[in-house]
Image (cartoon, rainbow, N blue to C red):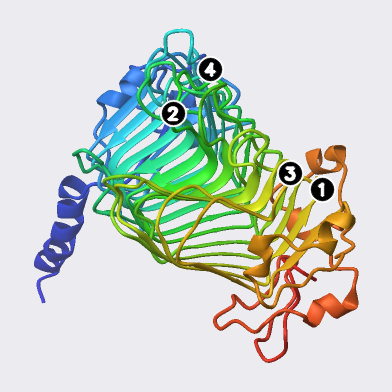
């Protein structure tokens, strides 16, 4: 055989790949030692500026690293990067510490129309919601398979992290604080009177993140602002092990207000193992609660959450005008402690706008509600069809309040425990308690925390607390069996479904 021809045959595909195949590269940016005349492909030949990074064309598998511990006074703005599951495009820090982008009045990082993007280990700071910034920190528009991990965002007029459109979104270990509208905001990119009616964003995960002191947006005068974590227009969402605190106190308007962690116009969402506390609203604003399933929610669950000292209710169940149908939602194994300081005055509050579609098929069971401001549950005027309250523990600490407030139709109560620490108050059951033919009127003997104790908690240890337990062993089997009960109580103990469960979040 002609060895020369064989050599050429072997060499052709090698040359073709060398000249015709793109190769993924790692690029470095060092604002102190770099130069934009460098190749950027080695630490020793790093680029200097984000402007250089913006002008480069990237491909699947490329990686872009910013020098850790350094400050970048600019913005990163990229479009149409097509990564893949095997070769995602990665943006992160290198060296010691995290890189910090000081973006001034602009967004820090904007990514559009891209896929399989990974962001991690970055800090973004805007000039401040009251100092000229008019953007979001991390602004992601119409991206798919987006991963955000171990980032911090503060000082933005709107949201620290905003996801607008796309699908398959994962946010973990994020700290979003001191922004205006929201800490972490995920919303549909569909436009119209309500931009999330089609529930178009699929598969959203937000975990192990904190939204703190996002007070309100001075640019929004006709709607709520100052939220912790908010998702809208989502199908299949999970928010877990997150904390929202001290948000909403500077919303610049009257009317509907912010909430710590909530969802609206979404389907198949679970919010679990989260901690919402000390959230607020404006002096004449509404809401300011811990958690909320708002307009258009379907087939969703709130479970194993702790809500304390919020100006609004611990758990809001709301339906506003123009929202899609609200039905088949569950609130179970949650705890509310002294929520409703200003609005709702209760642990669980129901509201349905008179012109909205009626709310249907709500099940609240095995929740523990401790309240000194008003009620266990409270109904604002509205139509509530098949609202069922079972196995809940309502403990009030003021003699003048009722366990159930407001007027309601279509709601039923069974096998709930009612107790007021003013003992004479329990001797003559209130009329609304008498609607519960299987009511338990007995002291649950709960051990309650001090305020300082709750300040020390985080979302990762709320389900191990020593408070709110059932000390009376008889109450641990006084609940009624409920099908599809989630399989465990607030503390993680198994609930088999074959034996009677306890009352409240029990243990």
Q: Which of marks 2 and 1 is nearer the N terminus?
A: 2
Judge depth for marks 1 and 4 and give the one in front: 1
Crowding at dot 4, Cα within 10 Å, few <14 / some 14-19 / many 20+, comes out as some
Judge depth for marks 2 and 4 and give the one in front: 2
User: In the picture provided, is 12 more to the left or to the right than 215?
Assistant: left
Q: Distance between the residues labelled 3 and 1?
A: 10 Å
Q: Earlier in the sequence, mark 3 or mark 1?
A: 3
64 and 361: which is toward the camera: 361
Q: Which of marks 2 and 4 is nearer the N terminus?
A: 4
Q: Is residue 367 in sight in this rendering?
A: no
Picture layout, residue 501 above or below residue 443: below
In the rendering, which numbered label is found on residue 476?
none
Q: Say which element carries label 3.
A: loop
Q: Distance between the residues labelled 2 and 1?
A: 29 Å
User: In the picture provided, is 21 more to the left or to the right than 291?
Assistant: left
In the rendering, which numbered label is found on residue 338?
3
Q: Distance between the residues labelled 1 and 4?
A: 52 Å
Residue annotated with mark 2:
255
């Amino acid at each position: 055989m002609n060895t020369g021809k064989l050599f050429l045959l072997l060499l052709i595909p090698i040359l073709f790949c060398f000249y015709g195949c793109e190769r993924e590269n790692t690029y470095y940016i060092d604002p102190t030692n770099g130069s934009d005349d460098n190749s950027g492909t080695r630490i020793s030949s790093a680029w200097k500026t984000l402007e250089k990074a913006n002008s480069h064309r990237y491909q699947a598998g490329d990686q872009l690293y910013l020098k850790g511990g350094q400050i970048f006074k600019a913005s990163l703005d990229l479009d149409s990067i097509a990564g893949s599951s095997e070769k995602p495009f990665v943006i992160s820090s290198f060296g010691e510490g995290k890189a910090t982008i000081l973006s001034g009045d602009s967004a820090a990082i904007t990514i559009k129309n891209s896929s399989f993007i990974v962001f991690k280990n970055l800090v973004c700071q805007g000039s401040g919601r009251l100092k000229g910034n008019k953007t979001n920190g991390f602004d992601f528009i119409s991206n798919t398979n987006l991963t955000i991990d171990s980032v911090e965002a503060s000082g933005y007029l709107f949201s620290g992290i905003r996801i607008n459109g796309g699908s398959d979104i994962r946010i973990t270990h994020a700290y979003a604080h001191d922004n205006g509208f929201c800490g972490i905001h995920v919303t549909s990119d569909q436009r119209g009177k309500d931009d999330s009616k089609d529930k178009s964003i699929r598969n959203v995960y937000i975990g192990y993140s904190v939204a703190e002191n996002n007070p309100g947006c001075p640019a929004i005068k006709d709607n709520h602002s100052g939220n912790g974590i908010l998702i809208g227009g989502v199908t299949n969402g999970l928010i877990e092990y997150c904390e929202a605190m001290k948000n909403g106190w500077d919303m610049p308007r009257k009317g509907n207000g912010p909430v710590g962690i909530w969802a609206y116009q979404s389907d198949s969402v679970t919010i679990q193992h989260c901690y919402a506390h000390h959230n607020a609203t404006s002096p004449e604003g509404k809401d300011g609660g811990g958690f909320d399933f708002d307009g258009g929610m379907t087939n969703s669950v709130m479970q194993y959450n702790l809500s304390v000292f919020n100006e609004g209710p611990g758990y809001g169940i709301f339906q506003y005008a123009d929202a899609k149908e609200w039905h088949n939602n569950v609130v179970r194994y949650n705890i509310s402690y002294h929520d409703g300081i200003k609005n709702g005055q209760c642990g669980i509050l129901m509201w349905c706008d008179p012109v909205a579609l009626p709310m249907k098929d709500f099940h609240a069971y095995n929740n523990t509600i401790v309240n000194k401001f008003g009620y266990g549950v409270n109904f604002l005027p509205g139509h509530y069809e098949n609202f069922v309250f079972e196995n809940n523990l309502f403990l009030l600490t003021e003699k003048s309040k009722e366990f159930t407030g407001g007027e309601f139709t279509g709601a039923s109560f069974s096998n709930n425990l009612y107790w007021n620490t003013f003992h004479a108050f329990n001797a003559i059951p209130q009329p609304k308690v008498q609607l519960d033919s299987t009511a338990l009127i007995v002291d649950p003997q709960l051990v309650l925390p001090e305020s300082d104790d709750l300040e020390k908690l985080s979302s990762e240890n709320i389900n191990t607390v020593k408070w709110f337990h059932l000390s009376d062993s008889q109450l641990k089997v006084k609940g009624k069996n409920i099908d599809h009960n989630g399989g465990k109580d607030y503390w993680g103990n198994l609930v088999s479904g074959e034996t009677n469960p306890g009352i409240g979040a029990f243990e």
